[in-house]
Image (cartoon, coloured by chain):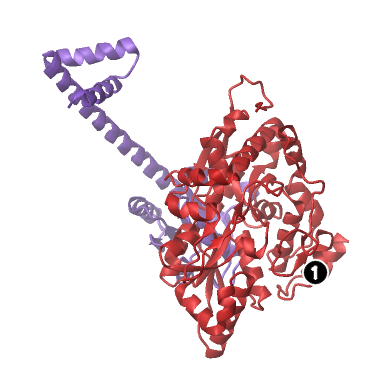
Amino acid sequence: MADIASGMMDAKPREVHVGFMPLTDCAPLVVASEMGFDRRHGVKLVLHREASWANIRDKLGVGNFDCAHMLAPMPIAAALGLGRASDLIVAPMALSLNGNAITVSHRLYEEMLAADEASARAGGMAAAHAIASVVRARQQQGREPLTLGMVYPFSCHNYDLRYWLAAAGIDPDNDVNLIVVPPPLSVDALKTGRVDGFCVGQPWNSVAVAEGEGVIVATKSELWAMSPEKVLGVREDWVAKNPALVSDLVRALVTACQWLDEPENRKEAARILARPEYVGISEQILAGPLTGVLTRGGQQANIVDSDLVVFHRGYANFPWRSHALWVLTQMIRWGQVREPFDLKALTERVFRTDLYREAVAPLGVPAPASDNKQEGGEGDGVFFGSESFDPTAALIYLRDLEIRNSGTDLAAFTALNS
Amino acid sequence: MSTNPDSSLKILVIDENPIRRAIIESGLAEAGFTAVTVLANTTRLIDHIYTLDPDVVLIDLENPSRDVLEQMFQVSRVVRRPIAMFVDKSDKTEIEAAIDAGVSAYIVDGLKKERVKPILETTMTRFRAFTRLQAELEEVKGALKERKIVEKAKGILMKRRGLDEEKAYELLRKTAMSQGRRIADVAQALVSSADLLED
């Protein structure tokens, strides 16, 4: 295959500093560096392992990194000025879809079985109904509410967990305690009973099962077939100054994602990620979900699902503006943002489909015709049970979601976005 | 020591490193801050913050629990007062300095920046001092290790080539010079080869 680099072929690859969190889905960055896909495209990745998403945001903000492995909602939150004020961060590509799961303690799983055995055993969306029965029973008995963990306020984990609970009639802000649990501390929190369950990325769900502390009750792929998760975050001003380098970087990472989506490479990916400088979790635990086999614990049958984490196929690297729009609906839904703003303009500024299209065209990698797509309904694959999301009617979709923060003036949003 | 007008500010320091924790605690005490609590274990962080109700929270950047603090802007039900970030966009140089030192600060909403500055500066100075100390320690460790290797290489040359100690060292030095390498590197190569040739 011909090498495509925008610079001169014999030029020294340009160093690009990239921050990542030790999670399974940092794989595109690690693989690009380990397999030399970066050099092939004129880039030399320098990887920086980080301990928190806040560090990723701050270090990208002050220029310690050029780009980073980010939760899809993070660049959106930055554009809205939520959390610490930062420069504008854009996403020229997505790094992966799916990959999260909801895990509960054995104690909670027993309660779920006792309250609603069929739903608990069915898993996925149904499992939330079993949790809802437990929540209501606890309320009637005057017991402590459940405490559930997620990884960051601006994360799909937060929105997924809230969506799942709300779909079963639970108000995540009032019926349960929702707290942040950093992934490496999540299994211990489950073990000591500080949380009754959590929504985190792999490998931490599988670590909980392997250590006999948790039962996986839902995978993200069961809730939403091809759902947004991690993106490549780049400062907007860095993109403006280094357009050719951004293209090279996207090509290098898309090539790594193509490699990662070949089933025969997943075991090798697990072997690389297991190293202490990357994820530092046993190869065996990493390999299960990467190869599509998920041990759920609690005497349940394994899940066999090749979509547990998706790195390339199905336009997985395309930074769908409708994904950004959906994230915005959830930020408004839960009161993270109250001031009305132009939703469409924000998705266009942050999710840079133009940069992606331009970068992958020379690779012959196809990109979709539209920047937006419907989820569920006429769209492809399941979206939270039988629900659907139409990006041309996002605020109507939001209005029709029964459980949401009552402090938000949806009419004001509608007036500004009509 | 002059009485610090802000000695009543409640400061929480979260750091898993015991040495650095002690260095920061003494630094803040010297600067006149008396209401300082240090926390090594972050397992019940929200409970601690709820109980202590600190005005300023300082946390080392290697700590994954930083993200727990981030959530406190979102949740006002768990903590009484929302904790706001120390910096806005205009404080970029301050963020840079803090990140470079390896620490992050959170303050309660409404607290004046000028009141927090001396706290952050003391903490940053102590963080930097600790990093320097650690680097020096590594250097000393490295130098000790190199000396041991050179001693071992000399021993090999003395045994195999029947040289005295001075001559053995001279040979190492000359080889290093002619190859443009460090004596310790030549010694390391010699020791490794000798190990390979041993039965």
Tell me the element at label 1: helix
Q: Where is residue B28 in the image (x, y as percent from the top left)?
A: 40, 54
Question: For mark 1, what is the residue?
Answer: A410
Displayed quadrant of residue A159: bottom right
Q: Where is residue B185 in the image (x, y as percent from the top left)?
A: 30, 22
Q: Chain A colour?
A: red
Q: Could you tell me how many numbered marks the image carries?
A: 1
- Asked if residue A173 shows in the view, the reply is no
Displayed quadrant of residue A292: bottom right
Q: Nearer the viewer, residue A262 or A139?
A: A262
Q: Chain B colour?
A: purple
Give the residue type that dot 1 points to: Leu
Chain under callout 1: A
A316 relative to A118 in the view: left or right = right
The structure residue drawn at horizontal position 49% and vertical position 69%, both measured from the top left corner, is: A215
- Asked if residue A283 shows in the view, the reply is yes
* Residue furthest out toward the right: A418
Against A197, residue A344 (above or below) is: above
* Residue furthest out toward the bottom: A141
Q: Nearer the viewer, residue B78 or A40?
A: A40
Screen quadrant of the N terminus of chain B: bottom left
Q: Where is residue B85 in the image (x, y as percent from the top left)?
A: 58, 57
The structure residue drawn at horizontal position 58% and vertical position 29%, both measured from the top left corner, is: A39
Screen quadrant of the C terminus of chain B: top left
Q: Position of residue B68 (x, y in %)?
A: 52, 62
